[in-house]
Image (tube, coloured by chain):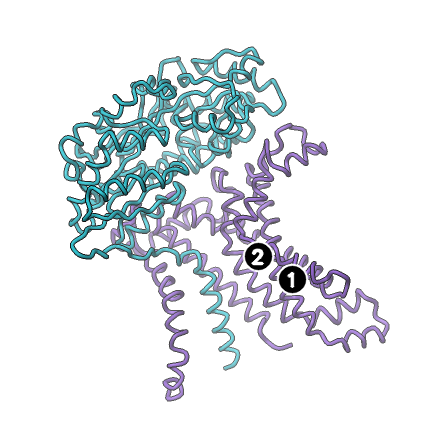
Chain colours: A purple, B cyan
Amino acid sequence: MKDLLKALPWIGPAVALIATVVLFPVGLMFYNSTRDISQSGVDKGGVGLDNFATVLGFEAFWPILGRTVVWVVVVVACTLLGSLALAALLNKAFPGRRLVRMAVIVPWASSVVMTTLVVHYGLEPYFGIINSFLVDVGLIDTPEGYGWTRHAGTAFAWAMVVAVFVSLPFTTYTILAGLQTVPGETVEAARIDGANGVRTYFSVVLPQLRGAISVAVLINIINVFNSLPILRVMTGSIPGYDADTVMTMIFKYMQNQRQIDLASALSVIAFLVVVVIVAVYVRMVRPLEEV
Amino acid sequence: MAQYKRFGGIMAITLATATGLTACGFGGSSSGEEGGGATTIDLLVPSYSDATQGLWNDVIAGFEEENPDITVNLQVESWDNLESVIATKIQGGDAPDIYNGGPFAGFAEDELLYPVEEVTSEETYADFQPTFLENAQVGGTTYGLPFIASARALFVNDALLEEAGAEVPATWDELLESAKKVSELGGGVAGYGMPLGSEEAQAEAAVWLWGGGGSFGDADAITVDTPENLAGAEFIKTMIDEGATQADAGATDRSPLFDIFVQGKVGMQVGLPPSVGQIESDNPDLEYSIHPIPTEDGSPFTLGVADHLMAFQNDGDKQEAITAFFDYFYTADVYVPWVQAEGFLPTTLSGSEELAGEESLAPFLEVLPDAQFYPTTNPDWAATDSAFKALFGQLDSKKSAADVLAEIQDRVDQG
């Protein structure tokens, strides 16, 4: 207790910051989710758990949740595989490695909305560069191209491609940092024992990357689950709910239907889902445990 | 213990990232900085074009010169964000004093607005076109000041129609025939540009459903799922199925599609008064003409839209300043250049007189007497609007027209 009091001046500012920018919005979100808020934003009183019942009773809710799982699993898995390959490449010494390492940062350094818009315009019929290319090489036979972003399936798939693209740099660098902590002796020992490159990688290097990979995966899961802008740009003009994830649905409640109460209720659900996923992950994988 | 610490750290990261989306709900309060008896009015407006901000700045400069004890704070937002910005501000107790937007009935319902007669002089109030005032009333009281109006008309690419040997249509059947002829030209040319994407699906819906004799209802009840509306919805499906429209009509937004009309790749599309200016600046060589919107039986009709200014009560102490601002703004010398620069139609009698000789506005002023409006005074209109945006595009799918209308009606009835 005394120790705590002594520490207070030092941790006080951090605690205050967390309270105002993290705990307060969370509390407000929980509070709003139990209120009836009119379209113009006036609080009309408490309604208990009615908002949750409405959200869970919406016929597209379960498909949306399922799509969210697909979105997270596919994007994180593809990101991880791509990053492992990239990191292994960047860990080798070759001329110009510094430039390539810088180039890998580019998708990270540019705005996600900008990156997505560039791809989105490329996919537009009539003037999109990707459509023009596909028409010119003869893969599409309609002269104006194909409406990639006008169909739920293709738009969702392209959104995944963009999501992997923007997630790669961070993951690659986390794994690259992990690779550089792998002691050279272990690799050398494997070599002397006669293991080939593939065997060395999977039996010696990969196990030692466990810490780096599990942290990268954890942060990616949270990020990808909460990703709105990519899907919002890629699937925004599609009617109905066939390309929505939980995040875009929250946005639709908030922006299109202006039902802040329902948006808050769905946010609470999303929040709990993330907390549960993270808790399970932390217990199972113990990402911060020493190897 | 060590493990719990780490766990706590991870939870903190999770909290911080997971709440990123919802944490933006609070805008800072910027009112209440009045010094020396001066009054500050907050003005929240959408951006109609790149010139909007400059036009408002001119108005404000002129107003502040005449009223040195009043300062005006201008905030310009994009149309996409406008409605969530105003909802957030109201929820945070920071509503603007004057707001420029579309639907206002919800605000009136929540008793947030001044009746217009309390914040305008008699002369200003009497100068509004009576039809527009009627369209701005809730329960007999006017809550919105008609601000600018627009009407729709059919933009026709004359060169494409001539090449295809097609006539300018007046009825749906003629439209289908002409559009199919133009589509058959190939090369990616579309006969009729049909934007059912979320951007403005409600407008294209009105063009078709009302053109077949339907309506969205009135101030008391929203009626979407009716036999009259079904005729229009089914004809939309016919247009799409017979290849008279561009591909993927259900998810095509209006603005990008009109860009393609301007490029000369679309035979016919419904456009607005500002579309004239867009063609003039982007592709002045386009051979086009403007005609009334085709309807089922060829009777004249147009979709009129009026945006409104509204005054929020807040603390109730700025009524005089707001009145002064409105009286200044609606004088013909200030108002008409504003409307003209944005390419819209005026809602005041004096404004219409002044613009009567304007040639580019003539096709629209001509159809204005037959204008029908959205039932914006119905408190459920906002829900209707969003239901159309989210669901109407499903006409371009296997779903039947009747199911789509029923789904929209259902959403509206749920509130």
Residue type of the residue flagged with mark 2: Ala
Which residue lies at the image location 85% right of the left edge and 75% below the top edge? A193
Q: Does residue B93 sit above or below A256 in this rendering?
A: below
What element does badge 2 sit on? helix
Chain under numbered label 2 = A
The residue at which mark 1 appears reads as A172
What element does badge 1 sit on? helix
Closer-to-camera residue (B339/A133): B339
Residue B229, picture quadrant: top left
Residue type of the residue flagged with mark 1: Thr
- Residue B220 visible in rendering: no
Q: Quadrant of the C terminus of chain A?
A: bottom right
Closer-to-camera residue (B229/B402): B229
10 Å crowding of disc 2: few (<14), some (14-19), many (20+): few
Can you give x and y, in whole percent of width and height, for residue B69 in the image? Answer: 18, 49
Chain under numbered label 1 = A
Can you give x and y, in whole percent of width and height, for residue B308 in the image? Answer: 28, 35
- Residue A166 visible in rendering: yes
Q: Does residue A66 sit above or below B53 in this rendering?
A: below
The residue at which mark 2 appears reads as A109
Q: Does residue B392 sit above or below A24 in this rendering?
A: above
With B2 as the anchor, is B109 left or right in this view?
Answer: left
Do the numbered discs 2 and 1 sit on residues whose CB atoms are within 8 Å? no
- The Cα atoms of the two marked residues, 2 and 1, are separated by 14 Å
Can you give x and y, in whole percent of width and height, for residue B16 in the image? Answer: 45, 64
Closer-to-camera residue (B355/B160): B355
Q: Earlier in the sequence, mark 2 or mark 1?
A: 2
With B316 as the anchor, is A289 left or right in this view?
Answer: right
Q: Does residue B46 sit above or below A262 in this rendering?
A: above
Q: Nearer the viewer, mark 2 or mark 1?
A: 2
Q: Which mark is residue B221?
A: none
Numbered marks: total: 2
